[in-house]
Image (tube, rainbow, N blue to C red):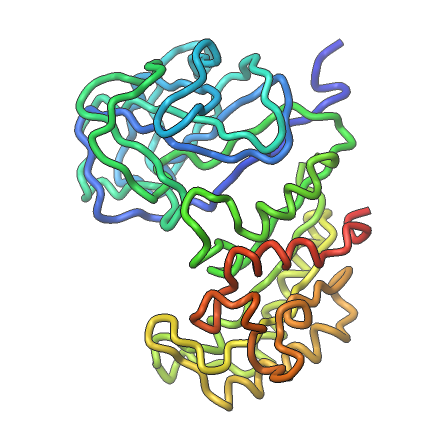
Amino acid sequence: MDERDDNRWVGTWTTVPVPVDGIALAGQTLRMISRISIGGSRVRVRISNAYGARDLAVGAAHLGLRSQGAGIVDGSGRPLTFNGSPSTTIPAGALVVSDPLNLDVAPLVDLAVSVYLPGQVPESFQLTGHDPAHQTNYISPGGDFAAATDMPVQEQTEVFLFVTGIEVLAPRQAGGIVAFGDSLTEGNISRLDANNRWPDQLARRLVARPGVTHVVVLLGVNDLRNSQGRADEIVTADDLIGGLHQLAVRAHAAGLAAFVGTVMTWENETFNGGHYTPEGEAKRRALNAWIRDNGVFDGVIDFEAALRDPGHPTRTLPRWDSGDHLHPNDLGYRHMADDIDLALFG
């Protein structure tokens, strides 16, 4: 029987590709560290050149269980192939998916994806990745070290480069959740390499339920903060309500159940200089009133109620506050995940 009859590929780790500036590469090997959610025994990797100005040559790629630092567990490494070849070229604006390989991976472990880029990749190339990653990744000196158990390190980076997804073959009934948000979902201010983002913590609770079936949207505070201070960026509560409504419609069109989170408090926030205003607070309250009573999303996750200070409800409880009055601390991110009723996901 074809393995696809009873199973399907599910993203166990993914990051949103964006343009990355300030990094140039010259015949070096990258080792990207990814904390996966569900496990499996068949794995494949996505490598993206979505923002590249020209084709990207991949000389070799490799996958293994990460031990510590830039090391992999001895004997766990497997070469990645692409249509049977150990090398490939990714056209500008495209991505490649590796051939499946056999590797037993447990839930919530770190995998190391190594990619050797034999050519020159200057800043003008426009690298694809994700910044910030809140994860230490590694760049070798010149040479192909993709299969090295202990890869030599020339420099470290807190950016994901080119590697944008890892998939496992899972039972067809398996479900997965996409967390769609801003820096609060990305885990800003959380501890480096600790995987304390609230989606990481939710994965900890969901490892017994592996494809994408649900989406959780947490957006709005940056629109209200109007961080650029430009008049043409000022939005109304109705603007944000219209945007969220459209996200729900688009999620349902894709066959996904869609949930929305309330916008959290930000009074007197200090991040990037601080952009709190009483007018923004009034819009936040109006937006949250709609969120709590909307008939568009399939359910509401009340992150604001989980984190706010009962004695000062326009601020985050100090126990959960990173200190900038906008982003939670590690304990706060965990509390966000722990406060979600898993029954929402079926």
Q: Residue at x 77, y 60 (%)?
A: 298
Residue 77, above or below 22: above
Can the viewer see residue 184? yes
Q: Residue at x 58, y 80 (%)?
A: 284
Front residue of 219/198: it is 198
Residue 235, above or below 188: below
The location of residue 245, given as percent across then percent down, is 66, 68
Q: Residue furthest bottom?
A: 278
The quarter holding residue 164 reads top left
Q: Residue at x 37, y 50 (%)?
A: 132
Front residue of 67/15: it is 67
Front residue of 177/39: it is 39
Asked if residue 159 lies left or right of residue 25, the reply is right
Tally of numbered tags = 0
Can the viewer see residue 81? no
Quadrant in which the N terminus is drawn: top right
The location of residue 321, given as percent across then percent down, is 51, 68
Residue 224, above or below 190: below
The location of residue 309, given as percent across then percent down, is 62, 77
Asked if residue 325 lies left or right of residue 293, the reply is left
Residue 168, above or below 219: above
Q: Residue at x 44, y 77 (%)?
A: 269
The location of residue 133, given as percent across then percent down, is 40, 46
Front residue of 277/126: it is 277
